[in-house]
Image: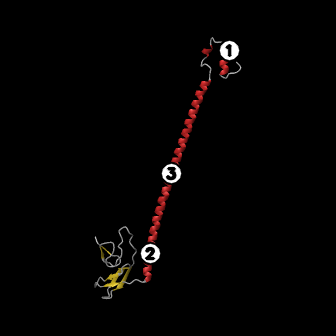
Amino acid sequence: MTTTCPKCGAEVYGKFCVMCGEKIPDDEETPREVKRMQMKCNACNGVMTFDSDQSILSCPFCGSKEIVLESDAVAVQKIKSSAQKEIAVEKLHSKERLSARRDDIQVMKMRYKIRNNISQHIVGFLWLIVAVVAVLILIFYMRTLAKMPLSDDSYINQNWLVVKVQLEDAGYKHI
């Protein structure tokens, strides 16, 4: 598939026009805004319609070619327009990068919250284990402190002084 140069109208097979050196926009690039103009052919006085981007005109009636000279103001305006488009594209890319960075920061904050919650749960679980172990140790210690027999049957047929001493050792008073 061949294309034509937007500036001079010549057939183009690459990325640049062989006739005028104009860069040919890719399909991805946005088309430029062009202004249609009319001029009279110097050879046959026929009316030629052309785009403002073209610098070489070809008459459709007689085939003669003419060079369209641009004024400095037109050239400056084209440069400004091109620069403004580049700035707009760069702003768009900057906004996309900033948005991606904000998304990354949000993800990092979420990860921090999750890690913080997990560590809080782990600390709480460890405190629960410490409390359970402390209670178990306390129960075991209290059992070893109790020097009393577990039932009344062990006091039957024993000397009351021995039973009194056992109860006092166990912590009872006024026996």
Mark 2 or mark 1: whose residue is earlier in sequence: 2
Q: On the image, which quarter does residue 61 sit in?
A: bottom left
Which image quarter: residue 8? bottom left
Kindly identify the amino acid type of the residue bearing the numbered disc 1. Leu
As drawn, the residue found furthest toward the top would be: 157
Q: Residue furthest right?
A: 174
Closest to the camera, between mark 2 and mark 1, is 1
Mark 1, residue position = 161
Which disc, if any, is residue 110? 3
- Gap between marks 2 and 1, in whole Å? 115 Å
Q: Which mark is residue 107?
A: none
Q: Percent from the top left, x then y, of residue 94? A: 47, 64
**Residue at x 43% of width, y 83% of height:** 72
For label 1, the SS is helix
Could you tell me how far apart the alpha carbons at marks 3 and 1 are, in whole angstroms? 72 Å
Return the residue nearer the eye: 120 or 88.
120
Q: Quadrant of residue 3?
A: bottom left
Q: Nearer the viewer, residue 127 or 85?
A: 127
Q: Position of residue 11 (x, y in %)?
A: 29, 76
Relative placement, left or right, of 133 versus 161 is left
Q: CA distance from mark 3 to mark 2?
A: 44 Å
Q: Is residue 116 above or below residue 30?
A: above
**Classed neighbour count for the residue bearing mark 1: other residues with Cα under 10 Å, few (<14), some (14–19), many (≥20):** few
Verify CB contact (< 8 Å) between mark 2 and mark 1: no
Three-letter amino acid code of the residue under disc 3: Met
Q: Earlier in the sequence, mark 3 or mark 1?
A: 3
Secondary element at image label 3: helix
For image coordinates 62% across by 24% down, the residue present is 145
Amino acid carrying mark 2 in the image: Ser
Q: Secondary structure at mark 2?
A: helix
> Residue 81, labelled with which disc?
2
